[in-house]
Amino acid sequence: MNYDTIRALCPKQDGADYDWAACCEVFPRLLALETTPQSPRYHAEGNVGVHTRMVLDALLECDHFAAAIGVQRETLFLAALLHDLCKPETTVVDPVSGEIGQPGHSRRGAVDVRSLLWRAGVPFELREAVCRIIAVHQVPFFVYDSRRGESPEFITRRLSWGVHLPDLVCVARADMRGRICADQQARLDDIALFEELAREDGCWAVPREAASAHTRLMYARGSKVHLDTPLFQEPGSQVTVLCGLPASGKDTWVARHGRDLEIVSFDDAKAELGLKHGENDGLAAHRAVDKAKALLRRHEPFVWNATHLSEQMRGKTLDLLYAYNANVRLVYLEVPADTLFKRNARRDTTLTQKDLERMLHRWEVPLPWEAHEVRYEV
């Protein structure tokens, strides 16, 4: 599988159809969708394979898809094709009621699709556009019924900072039209209201404007601030947080750009403590965090060098930094799959190739709103 075989799956012009057998040949995991059941309440059409084909049929009838060309067209098709890829792995059946659910399939799907497309050499921008849509493809259904109690405006604005909303809505509509359920029209009405809200708020096809990077960041993190009014930023450290898989070039980045700065590093802490990979990580983390806190109290600039691979792990670091009023630049680093595994094999490290493979299941690329500035060096 490579990028050329993947892009060949996408219908290139109006009236062209897709080849489901070819899709399954390129992405064999799609075959498992044919035997994965769904809740009849939300998917009376049948299994996930039936649903996915109905979604693709609905996508091909969408005006937005018809008008799309090149990379955008590939993005829409791949997002629709792979949006439920992880339903087989996430399927649970209630032993009492028999109710079928697939909790977390969107987020896990985005992670697994990222790994698949990365190995195939799909360009970073295309890959991440697909994965970001998959991660939130159901959100437009429930913008006006948030389980977290978030306002429709908040959800829409934060989404606009990471996803092209017209593309998200196109896939969401296809997902809803490609099924049989009692509340189909109600959910399509909610998607239409979501689109109207985004248009009125000025973030339909562009990210919602904010008075400053700090204002946007604090708003995205849940602070009750007005996006159009600059939020005062307390003085603090200037911190560069590195993010990326092991062997992606973080140490090289530090050698080039951080020579005169203090470095906070879990790997350095492990080395100082004589620990191997996976051995007493808590002790190493405690040592690194203590060093960071000391630098933050003195408002000193530094680089935090760690994988920060999942949103949860990044969140722990970022929560600490923002509690000390740090100004954060997040630098994400990435190299092709072959390069990464070859580098890791050559490195003097206790991280095995199998350990590295397992880390791919936690791989979430940072979103633009996670820091004052986010750079992608790929």
Image (cartoon, rainbow, N blue to C red):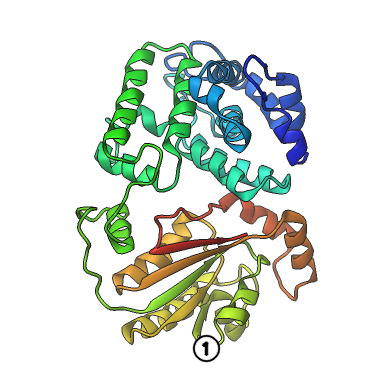
Q: Is residue 213 above or below residue 143?
A: below
Question: Closest to the observer: 188 or 149?
Answer: 188
Where's residue 360, x and y in %?
63, 52
Where's residue 9, x and y in %?
71, 28
Q: Residues within 10 Å of mark 1 (few under 14, many from 20)?
A: few
Question: Closest to the observer: 319 or 191?
Answer: 191
Residue lying at 65% horizontally and 19% vertically, measured from the top left: 34
Where's residue 132, x and y in %?
50, 42
Which quarter of the rendered picture does the N terminus lie within? top right
Q: Is residue 336 above or below residue 36?
A: below
Q: Tell whether 65 sits left or right of 217.
A: right
Q: Could you tell me if residue 137 is visible in this image?
A: no
Residue under pointer 1: 260
Residue lying at 65% horizontally and 21% vertically, measured from the top left: 13
Where's residue 114, x and y in %?
61, 45
Q: Tell whether 86 sits left or right of 191.
A: right
Q: Could you tell me if residue 98 is visible in this image?
A: yes
Which quarter of the rendered picture does the C terminus lie within? bottom right
